[in-house]
Amino acid sequence: MIRSQNLLAGPLLAGLLVPLTALAEGYQTPPPELAALVDAPRTPLQSLSPRNDTVLQTHRPGLPGIADVAQPELKLAGLRLNPKMRAASRFDFGNALSLLDVASGKSRAVTGLPAKPRIADSAWSPDGKQVALSLWGERGVELWLLDAASARARRLGDFHLNAASCRGFAWMGRQLLVKRLPAGQGPAPEKPAAPDGPNIQQSAGGALSQTRTYPDLLKTPYDADLLDYELNSQLALVDISGKAKLIGKPDRYLSVQASPDRQYLLATRLLRPYSTLVPISRFPRLVEVIDLQGRSVRQVAKRPLQERMPSGNDAVATGPREIGWRADAPATLFWAEAQDGGDPSVDAKVRDALFLQPAPFKQAPFKLQELASRFSDVQWGRDDLALISEYWWKTRDLKVWRVRPAEPGQPPALLSQRSSEDRYADPGSPAVISNADSLPVLQTSPDGGSLYLLGDGASPEGDRPFIDRLSLADNKTTRLWRSQAPWYETPLAVLNGGERALLSREQVDAPPNLYLKALDQDGGLRQLTFFPHPTPQLKNVQKRQLRYKRADGIDLTATLYLPPGHDAKRDGPLPMLMWAYPTEFKSADAASQVTDSPYRFNRVGYWGPEALLARGYAVLDNPSMPIVGAGKQEPNDSYLPQLKMDAQAAVDEVVRLGVADRDRIAIGGHSYGAFMTANLLAHTRLFRAGIARSGAYNRTLTPFGFQSEERDFWQAKDIYQTMSPFNYAEQIKDALLLIHGEADNNPGTFPIQSERMYQALQGLGATVRLAMLPAESHGYRARESILHMLWEEDRWLDQYVKHAKPRAQEARPQ
């Protein structure tokens, strides 16, 4: 007995007291200046009507509480579901609506909503006269209808929607196509009190297959039965009076889309058998056309279980995929189909073929186009106009073609070709509008001879968004408008046949607001919204875009923020937090391009590093961390040397400018940025501390690829081992704060990654702290969690950075 007492009173007890104390702390609140950022007002979500005359504004309350975020949640085959609502889990709702008249700028509050509504989704009717809404009620997801003329909302019918795999409703002319809960379905299956037996997985062998690590997979037969129950829904048509007409029988519908002529439905249903290895996106499914009575008209694809796929980021499934309706035709199916077995390692001149098949689907499909790489996107316009994009990830080659859907014999015309990494060469994206069937189609000029292109306008002077007119006759562009300093303006829509545009307009000290712009006038601006500065206490934050070089000559950029009133020459250098996220490139030229704009609004929120400005830190946000692999070299072949060069260049630049103290700089990041943070602490002594949120640190736990790495562990063992900071934990000599959501839903960043990294570091005697946030996913949602995150970061930086003593010159390896 005495020996036991002595043992408990010795080093073992001391070791146990640390985690026990941490467990007893509870949620903490940061200083008021940080808490104020969490509770700052949020800008409404805005949706322009099809007639471009009204903006629906969805107003949002503050962050949800942990009691809401921690409600029961089902994790099934990659889905996260609220079992009470029969809907995908969500925590961000609107709590009020208003309608903004574009012509006058007047706003009307929407009436008729219940007290404290939880507004989930909305969709304008094709004629722009009504808005369909889904609201989370006490017993399920309800369908509501907003009349734009009266600005009054009402509930439509007494049923509940099934929003487990999609929002559960869509306009179909003057009616709504809905997925509703089946009448008389009964309660969910009960979990067995005792298991029926072991859960077994077996592979019969086969070709190499690249299956990444996925969260929330099915584990037992009970999970499979529960997934069936949650997805089971009844299709119905609901008119604006609330009267419903059922379509067929209930089934496990994943999605359903009406044909533009409203005569057919393209329905996707889940099939058995399920898998414990891959998520629902790779489960068997049947895609078929059904009529409005639910009868099968055309089976488009019956896809088997896809537990095995070819390796590589350019790999796709065989058989029809990307199946949908041609938006500008009454009822014509469209799909892509691999011609190389979906395997990028196979030599092939033609990778994908695109097919069309019009109703009544009696004639064989005709081939619209063959592609030398993978189909990426299609935008429909009219019989002689559609744009098709193809992409090859390995080379980053992106092409856009013009095709004539009604003239399959006509060869496609190449509109543009560039590297997807080359932002300077981006011609912009075609503007789209909603047609009479509420489907997106290409917006053409009044004479039909031109398209409008909206782009970011990336350039050596920063992003300067633009509107161009593209002539379809000769592919020449005319610049209609370009954002002008000192404003950052984003085009949202082209109005009145190209005469006006709806812009979002912001400045360093002015938050984004909506404006009407006459494109043929130098002025011609009229402000429509007047959202105030959400954090006026930080209105005078200083912002500067930095440009500097790393050791091998690659140009880098970053955004520097300084607290209000700080003068580096007068006040000296500050402690600094750098926050970054590495990006892979295939060319040094693309890696050197300038990103962002110095004229964007200084949005000091709680999620990024800018919050620490309120505590007197300098902030370097998004310093370029390019990892370049030119030619046959892959970026990760030299990940560490390049990462160290990136970090060294950033540190040298802020020290040269006199804004940061070399001995008081911290590095931080989220997800892949957390991985970067741990690597920089393991392989340099550039930073006094690190903040790593929701990261991965041991790449052998993601053996079939991660981020943009498409090689598996066995093909690139040295790369995986070298890039894993877990393998070099003994080299981490500076303080590391790990934060992770206990319910992380991101592939690869399982919570065990942070738990094992902490275990290694504490065992090695490092300075480390791990904060696991209950019920939180890859991004944190509850107010209590966000406040606690800021408390952890502020306290960590205060202890290990702000008051850090200078390092001896000889102890500062470069």
Image (tube, rainbow, N blue to C red):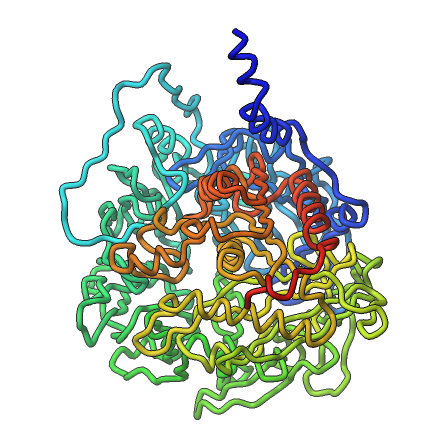
**Snapshot quadrant of residue 360:** bottom left
Q: Nearer the viewer, residue 646 or 325?
A: 646
Picture layout, residue 653 above or below residue 113: below
Rendering coords of residue 696 (x, y %): 45, 49
> What residue sits 76% from the left and 82% below the top?
524
Q: Is residue 530 left or right of residue 765?
A: right
> What residue sits 49% from the left and 83% below the top?
425
Q: Is residue 297 left or right of residue 461?
A: left
Count numbered badges in the picture. Answer: 0
Rendering coords of residue 162 (x, y %): 47, 37
**Snapshot quadrant of residue 402:** bottom left
Point out the residue furthest to the top here. 1
Answer whether residue 143 is visible to the viewer in this image.
Answer: no
Quarter of the figure with the C terminus: bottom right
Answer whether residue 285 is visible to the viewer in this image.
Answer: yes
Q: Nearer the viewer, residue 272 or 153?
A: 272
Rendering coords of residue 567 (x, y %): 83, 71
**Snapshot quadrant of residue 91:** top right
> What residue sits 40% from the left and 50% below the top?
727
Q: Nearer the viewer, residue 569 or 103?
A: 569
Rendering coords of residue 713 (x, y %): 29, 54
